[in-house]
Image (cartoon, grey):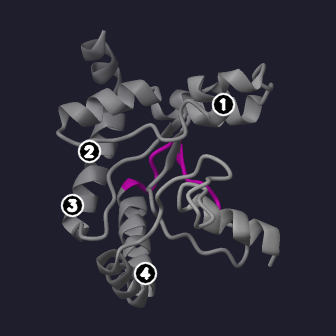
Amino acid sequence: RDASVAEALRLGRDYGNPGDYDCHFPGINARMSELHATLGLWSLARLDERIDRRAALVRTFQDTVAGIPGLRYPTLGGDDVSTYKDLTLIVDPEAFGLTVPELTAALKAEGIDSRRYYFPPIHRQKAYAHLGPSRDLPVTDDIAERVITPPLWSHMTDEDVRRVGEAVVRIHEQAAEVRAALR
């Protein structure tokens, strides 16, 4: 609702060009093609359905690993709804029996790809080092060390998700053997 911000965004999406090719600032080419706009509108029409599906897949995973110590999930506030873009786990290595890098390696050995999104946290990334010294954010650093994201996509079957959860359960149950094999 700020006219100057709206104008800056309009200019920025077209290389900072106000129309006379005398660019006011470095911008990007962020115009959307008609095809991409059509796909975007089609996607929005099915958004609630996809969010519901992803939430069901997350519940299937959570049910599969229920009772395994050392696993928790980001929490939602009262009326918040997650799109579950990712299935994020926060691992307590003492309770689970393995660190996140060890769990990642064990999942890989099971043929299951995972990611360590949010690691390193932004204030530790090289891309932002030029902004000055990193701030002391101990909670962020702690959580970032313990986050892993197993696979989740809208077209996974319940069985796919159960297979991932069952692998996590097996890995936990064999944590000592996994750790020994990794060393």
* Residue 12 location (% of width, % of height): 61, 58
Query: Which residue type carries mark 3?
Result: Asp
- Residue range highlighted in magenta: 65-75
Where does label 3 land, which residue? 160
Query: Which residue type carries mark 4?
Result: Asp
Crowd band around label 3 with a 10 angstrom C-alpha radius: few (<14), some (14–19), many (20+): some
Q: Quadrant of residue 118?
A: top right
Secondary structure mostly taken by the magenta-highlighted segment of the chain:
loop
Residue 68 among magenta residues? yes
Q: CA distance from mark 1 to mark 4?
A: 31 Å
Task: Give the secondary structure at mark 1.
Answer: helix
Where does label 4 land, which residue? 52
Where does label 1 land, which residue? 142
Q: CA distance from mark 4 to mark 2?
A: 24 Å
Q: Which residue is at the front of the view, 16 or 49?
A: 16
Viewport quadrant of the C terminus? top left
